[in-house]
Image (cartoon, coloured by chain):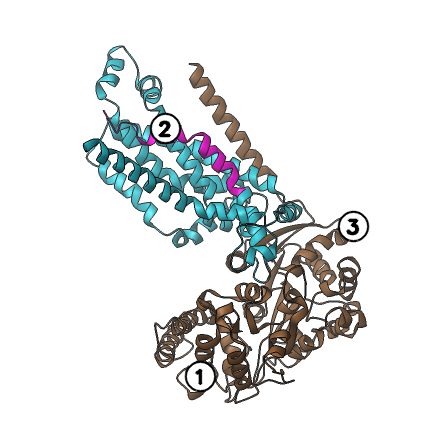
Amino acid sequence: MSRLKATRTAICTLALLLAGSTLSSAEAAGTLTIATVNNGDMIVMRQLSQEFEKAHPDIHLNWVTLEENVLRQRVTTDIAMKTGQFDIVTIGNYEVPIWARRGWLTEIKPDAAYDVNDILPPVRDSLTADGKLYALPFYAESVMTYYRKDLFQKAGLTMPDAPTYDQIRQFADKITDKGNQVYGICLRGKPGWGENMAYISSLANTFGAQWFDMSWKPTMTSDAWKAALNWYVSAMKADGPPGATSNGFNENLALFASGHCGIWIDSTVAGGLLFDPKQSQVADKVGFAPSPKGPYGKGPTWLWSWSLAIPVSSHQSADAQTFITWATSKDYVKLVAAQKGWVAVPAGTRASTYAAPEYVKAAPFASFVLNAIKTADPNGQTAQPRPYTGAQFVGIPEFQAIGTQVGQTVAATLSDQMTVDQALTSAQASITRALRQSGRAR
Amino acid sequence: MALKTKTSTRIGVTALGWSIALWLFFPIFWMILTSFKSEVQAISTPPKLFFMPTLSSYGEVFERASYWHFALNTVIVSVGATAIAVVLAVPAAYSMAFLPSKRTRGILLWMLSTRMLPPVGVLVPIYLLARNTHLLDTCTGLAVVDMLTNLPIIVWMLYTFFREVPAPILEAGRMDGATRWQEMTMVLLPLALPGIASTALLSLILCWNEAFWSLNLTSSHAAPLTAFIASFSSPEGLFFGKLSAASTLAVAPILVFGWISQKQLVRGLTFGAVK
């Protein structure tokens, strides 16, 4: 009997616990839920947001930090089903125009004091759809070349002001010392539309290749694509690290920071990380150069920005706009500089940041980043006319699936499961099929 | 000669057992080790086995997130889901074990087949149900989903344990005037307690480690430790030290709990194996 009593008591306690947990989840008015990624700038923003809450006592911030892919999936589900769980979402310039045209995002109308024209034009344009601004950037990046000055000096090499891919290959050959685990070149090899295909798309553009022609027919079997991919595979096999198909941004950052890479071509965000002695063993040996040019020499390069947007499902869009205009303002940049130092201020977003002598002094790579973003040209023209925009991605909803699938095929060439020709033929067929299924091409 | 062979076999089996145990434990050992490294040490090549330990990763983890909030949610969800599942599964398994019909086997197989469906296949309907019943981001919602996910396994395990209980013992109870309820609670349950305890433990561990539904159905209020770990993965920047520290903190309670209750678990899992 006493056992029965104990069981009943346990069930009642549990029911109370669960009921309590349900009640506690009821959202208080004035609380903004922000879905975000775990990167350096966001961590700083989260810490400094206490200042915002002090200045706006009626607004409380509730942060939800998620892994990038989980964030994308959660936010897409939330917005598509109009759940309204998030008042502010962190999304990239790939999603902003697509989601805005679907009516998922609220237009942002900052006041004059915000000085929207201070945002670097390529970044601002990439967050605009049909002439309306749908997100504000808290950080933006392009692509640049990192190299080890000490290894170059030892080999008697000098990095030119505007290197070409042929030169990069020659340099990589000369500084590779596999016996001492020093690899001439490190590039992304991990499959994914935002991983290896971000770099490969940028490489293809400067080699005169592109994803589609004006009738949305894939052009993967073109000579330009073959030349670009042959360069990549040949360089990585001769001078790259082993197991390169597992290497994304973070893995290459770890390799370069621990002294195992001679040259690394990747996002400009790595500049601050490699320059920080707490995170890099080669902080005093890093050299910077622009992204190399291929035979075509022009074309879009790379532009990515993490931005804050307001889903239409949010019930507190006015408060949400107050926060995101604060978090991306000139005053916020000054606050970060005062609290964390100039090197920690959000990069790639505001012209005024690059005009500040303190920032230029603290971040010697600043001019490379600014120039890289200004010349990223995501809406620019490739060797042949193209029906899409985007630098290191194609600004259509199908690209996430297409890019990841082609990324796996490209990775197969690095692991000798396919030749370059086989990979490109396979990619051509899979993209054609995907676009036919989506109804974009017939 | 025979004794010598027996001894060498025993040594061989012991060595094999230890090798497998060490091989299985190595990732956990490495995770714990990495959690005491700085971010630069965590990524160094070749990996460092000997280094000056630091608590900086733990410091950052505690500074950035409220560990106790996530841990409490995990306890509520795991204990809640397990308790409800056991309460529902005991009568179900009892009826299937002692009052079988011609459809019992089919029902059992159907229940098990629900485990074969990839969770993402039912994400949209479950998400919509949770939204419409206001159970998104609540411990109740997550506990119900976890309970439903584990119910087939729990029913199956309890069914197997109950089948091992000799029917004449229950009959003797009935002869003494016990009702069905009394037969189940006063005769069957005490006899099958080791089996029920090990089933509950297994369910607790499964709920503790469940990540898919945790990440999709919760955001902040009801987010458990799996969401806590995921928040330390970074798209750009070094995070192995912090991620290892967060993972160590997340698995530590269940690891200690499992270690303390391992005797019970093994006894339960081998319940009825030897008659």
Q: In which quarter of the image is the N terminus of chain A?
A: top left
Contact? badges 2 and 1 (CB < 8 Å): no
Kindly state the secondary structure of the residue where label 3 is placed: helix
Give above or below for A169 relative to A7.
Answer: below
Give above or below for A230 relative to B210.
Answer: below
Q: Specify the quadrant of the image occupied by residue A331.
A: bottom right
Q: Does the magenta stretch include residue B260?
A: yes
The answer to whether tags 3 and 2 share a subunit is no
Q: Indicate the position of residue B38 as horizontal and vertical percent values.
A: 61, 53
Could you tell whether B275 is left or right of B208 in the image? left
What type of secondary structure mainly makes up the magenta span?
A: helix
Give the foreground label among 3 and 2.
2
Cα separation between marks 3 and 1 = 54 Å
Give above or below for A179 relative to B54.
Answer: below
Q: Indicate the position of residue A69 as horizontal and vertical percent values.
A: 51, 60
Q: In which quarter of the image is the C terminus of chain A?
A: bottom left
Q: Which residue lies furthest to the top in this view?
A: B176
Q: Is residue B268 magenta?
A: yes
Report which residue position mark 3 lands on. Answer: A54
Q: Indicate the position of residue B115 as horizontal and vertical percent values.
A: 34, 46
Of residue B62 and residue A70, the one placed in the foreground of this image is: B62
Give the amino acid at mark 1: Trp
Contact? badges 3 and 1 (CB < 8 Å): no
Contact? badges 3 and 2 (CB < 8 Å): no
Binning the other alpha carbons within 10 Å of mark 2 as few (below 14), some (14 to 19) or many (20 upward) gives many
Cα separation between marks 2 and 1 = 62 Å
Q: Colour of chain A?
A: brown
Q: Which chain is cyan?
A: B
Q: Give the range drawn in magenta.
A: B250-275
